[in-house]
Image: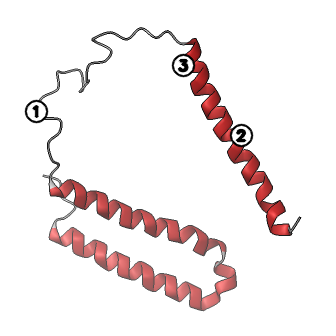
């Protein structure tokens, strides 16, 4: 077996065990739990009050803007982990290029902040 395949065998085993355990616990819960649905259990719940307004209404555009900004800055962190692992191999060029990347994202964040995109009204 090639070396790369043997490196991934433990990851595959742990993944399969996690899925088996997850589905096993769900199946046991379904099989052993009491299934007695009634009107109150199937009713929508909103902080202890009866639901108000149209639940199929549209969200304000600010909600999508904040969600998009979260995804952008979350991806920034996702790029930092692999970069940190190979930083010693990349040297000064890798460090400088990541600092430029972070500077561009920081300028974008400051711009959004100044424009008020992060204010929730």
How crowded is the residue under tag 2: few (<14 C-alpha within 10 Å), some, or many (20+)? few
Mark 3 or mark 2, whichever is nearer to me: 3
Q: Are marks 2 and 1 in contact (CB under 8 Å)?
A: no
The mark that comes first in sequence, 2 or 1, is 2
**Residue hosting label 3:** 30
Q: First in sequence: mark 1 or mark 3?
A: 3
In screen coordinates, is 94 left or right of 4? left
Q: Is residue 109 above or below residue 64?
A: below
Please give the residue where the numbered disc 1 appears in the rendered image.
Answer: 53
Residue 1 bears which disc, if any? none
- CB under 8 Å between discs 1 and 3: no
Cα separation, mark 1 vs mark 3, equals 33 Å
Instruction: Name the residue at 64% across, 79% down.
Output: 87
Q: Is residue 45 left or right of residue 58?
A: right
The residue at which mark 2 appears reads as 17
Look at the picture and state if 15 lies above or below 41.
below
Disc 3, SS: helix
Residue 2 spot, x, y in % from top left: 86, 68
* Residue count near mark 3 (Cα–Cα under 10 Å), binned few <14, some 14–19, many ≥20: few
Quarter of the image where the N terminus is located: bottom right
Q: Is residue 89 above or below residue 110?
A: below
Q: Secondary structure at mark 1?
A: loop
- Horizontal placement of 108 versus 60: left or right? right
Asked whether 79 or 2 is in front, the reply is: 2
Q: Residues within 10 Å of mark 1 (few under 14, many from 20)?
A: few
């Amino acid at each position: 077996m090639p070396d790369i395949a043997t490196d991934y065998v433990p990851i595959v085993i742990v993944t399969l065990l996690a899925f088996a355990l997850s589905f096993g616990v769900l199946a046991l819960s379904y099989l052993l739990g009491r299934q007695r649905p009634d009107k109150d259990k199937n009713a929508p719940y909103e902080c202890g009050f009866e639901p108000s307004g149209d639940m199929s209404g549209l969200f304000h555009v600010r909600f999508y803007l904040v969600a998009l900004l979260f995804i952008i800055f979350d991806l920034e962190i996702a790029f930092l982990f692999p970069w940190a692992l190979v930083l010693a191999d990349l040297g000064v060029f890798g460090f400088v290029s990541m600092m430029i990347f972070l500077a561009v994202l920081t300028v974008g964040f400051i711009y959004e902040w100044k424009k008020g995109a992060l204010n929730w009204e």
